[in-house]
């Protein structure tokens, strides 16, 4: 398993992408980057192209992109425009492809949250439609869309890993799979058994300390090793993206990479 970083979590630049810390991430031992599509899509074309060029030449491959849909492009509720969803998804996937990305994380709470009074069942159908459409658009690029469960404080739809697994299995789309995020997983007190029994469905992971979503730096903080052990038992060999906050980037990411590497090799 390779250890990477979600750059937007500690972004300080006006673009909110986080590439200003590339050197620090490299020194800390990170092996790939994960970039935010919503923030990239909000930039002027020239600035976006410059950032893509910087990322491609950094020496750290962009394994994944997160923040797929902005809140302005709704995928559930009465105001969904299928044409707008398709237009945006196509453009965002093209940007991800230009970065050399393999996975796009479909979290996007503001885009997917169900409006008050709207049918949960209908919203889930709409969300599935957006997933299937995105999978179709991603297919020619070899990109896989991964469903991210979000805790109930952030979203009112698809809150647990079993929820995302159910949707992925029901769609049975070759380019729609699952993500498991330790932060959301642990907040929900979910069982590790479902990870072990979901061989082939998990294609990407995130990790952070559940305390203030910090960068994980110490094995005594949480049972990170148990989480990684069960990922391995379920056949997972992909990346683990650190998706946490810190004010001391190089020092804490060096600790985090060492910690996670120890978990991977020791499990």
Image (tube, rainbow, N blue to C red):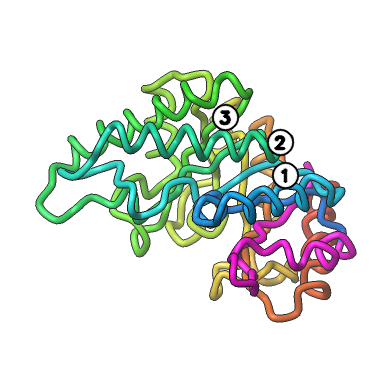
Q: Is residue 91 left or right of residue 243?
A: left
Q: Is residue 33 visible?
A: yes
Magenta segment includes 29: no
Q: Is residue 52 left or right of residue 103?
A: right
Q: Position of residue 206 (x, y in %)?
A: 61, 52
Label 3, secondary structure: give it. Answer: strand
Q: Residues within 10 Å of mark 3 (few under 14, many from 20)?
A: many
In the image shown, does 165 or 224 lie closer to the viewer? 165
Q: How many angstroms separate mark 2 from mark 3 (CA)? A: 12 Å
Residue on which the image places disc 2? 100
Which is nearer the N-term, disc 1 or disc 3?
1
Residue on which the image places disc 3? 144
Q: Please, is residue 99 above or below residue 262 in the view?
A: above
Span shown in magenta: 1-28
Q: Position of residue 37 (x, y in %)?
A: 55, 49
In the image shown, does 183 or 171 lie closer to the viewer? 171
Q: How many angstroms separate mark 1 from mark 3 (CA)? A: 14 Å
């Amino acid at each position: 398993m390779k250890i990477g970083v979600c750059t937007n979590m500690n972004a300080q630049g006006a673009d909110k992408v986080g590439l200003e810390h590339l050197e620090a991430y490299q020194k800390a031992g990170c092996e790939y980057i994960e970039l935010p599509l919503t923030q990239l899509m909000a930039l002027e074309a020239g600035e976006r192209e410059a950032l893509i060029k910087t990322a491609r030449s950094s020496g750290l491959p962009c394994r994944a992109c997160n923040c797929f849909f902005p809140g302005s492009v709704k995928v559930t509720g009465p105001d969904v425009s299928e044409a707008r969803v398709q237009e945006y998804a196509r453009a965002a996937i093209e940007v991800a492809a230009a970065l050399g990305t393999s996975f796009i994380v479909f979290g996007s709470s503001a885009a997917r949250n169900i409006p008050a009074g709207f049918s949960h069942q209908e919203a889930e159908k709409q969300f599935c439609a957006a997933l299937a459409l995105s999978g179709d658009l991603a297919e020619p690029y070899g990109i896989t869309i991964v469903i991210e469960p979000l805790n109930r404080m952030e979203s009112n739809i698809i809150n647990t890993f079993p929820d995302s697994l159910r949707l992925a299995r029901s769609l049975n789309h070759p380019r729609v799979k699952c993500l498991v995020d330790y932060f959301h997983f642990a907040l929900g007190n979910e069982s590790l058994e479902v990870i072990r029994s979901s061989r082939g469905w998990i294609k990407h992971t995130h990790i952070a300390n559940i305390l203030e979503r910090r960068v994980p730096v110490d094995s005594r903080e949480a049972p990170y090793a148990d989480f990684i052990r069960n990922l391995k038992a379920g056949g997972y060999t992909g990346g683990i993206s650190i998706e946490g906050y810190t004010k001391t980037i190089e020092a804490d990411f060096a600790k985090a990479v060492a910690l996670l590497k120890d978990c991977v090799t020791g499990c």
